[in-house]
Image (spheres, rainbow, N blue to C red):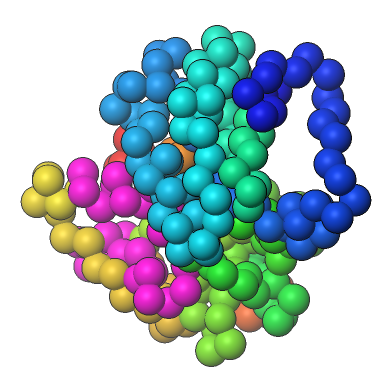
Amino acid sequence: MWYEGKLIRSGKIELGIEDPGLLYGATVFTTLRVYHHSLDDGRTNWRGHLRRLSNSIKTLGWQEPNWESIRQGAEILQREFPVLRITIFCDGREWIVGRQLPEDLVERQQQGIVAWLAEGTQFRRSLAEHKTGNYLTAWLALNQAKKYGAKEAILIDESGNWLETSTGNLWGWQDGRWWTPPLTAGILPGLMREQLIDWLKSQNEIVEEEPWTPDLVLGMEAIAYSNSVVEVVPIHRVVGRWGDGEMGRWGDGEMGSVLS
């Protein structure tokens, strides 16, 4: 890992007992996938990830980090890891860790996954427009989903509208056009979501950013979720109380094949 300008080979860092990052999750982070071992590859979207971090830091009134040190650490770690998580503490300290891609990623992309509908106020995120270290609600939802044999959890609002998954943004196909919940609904402005919207519009495809009401969802021909690591993964079945145990099925792998 990389922490405060230094490469650390152990699996531990030292934090003070009064560190706001430890006590309150007072950090912001971004997770990126490095393509072709290059931070400057267009698909890596390095500038987009730094832009999101910078915007959150400015909005929250935190100290700017050493961006050159972040770049240096990322360059070193990307030699061994295709996925990097960059965390910034409120006082500007940087912490970068690397990991591998999910072992079953190709299977997920080709066959789709089961998702669980996370009903309950304990699964509603605060400061949803920022990726802060306080990710407890999404973590709880994802772990609860695993108990139902699902790979993802779908978060909803107080009206039952679908918002996003615990790790990504939602996509749907209906009436010859693409659908994704709007940022105004209180979702994370995902960078893969942003890239997909730009790419689809460049191909003269229609993208509707509308609230995902229950009626809209039931009319979807295919649904999926996206993030910067897994790209696009189809959701072929959703389980949860909303649908009396199983709320719907969609064509296995259809969304992934259309967007790939």
Residue 227 placed where, x, y %? 47, 45
- Relative to 98, residue 224 above or below: below
Along the horizontal axis of the image, is 156 left or right of 180?
A: right
Residue at 35% from the left image edge and 41% from the top image edge: 48
Residue at 74% from the left image edge and 53% from the top image edge: 21
Residue 226 placed where, x, y %? 45, 48
- Identify the residue at the far right of this view: 17
Magenta stretch: give its range.
173-199
Along the horizontal axis of the image, is 98 left or right of 173?
A: right
Residue at 62% from the left image edge and 70% from the top image edge: 125
127 or 66: nearer the viewer: 66
Q: Is residue 118 magenta?
A: no
Q: Is residue 180 magenta?
A: yes
On the image, which quarter does residue 182 sit in?
A: bottom left
35 or 103: nearer the viewer: 35
Along the horizontal axis of the image, is 22 left or right of 107?
A: right
21 or 187: nearer the viewer: 21
Residue 230 placed where, x, y %? 51, 37
Residue 44 placed where, x, y %? 39, 29
On the image, which quarter does residue 78 sit in?
A: top right
Along the horizontal axis of the image, is 253 left or right of 98?
A: left
- Relative to 19, residue 184 above or below: below
- Identify the residue at the far top of this view: 79
Quadrant of the image containing the C terminus: top left
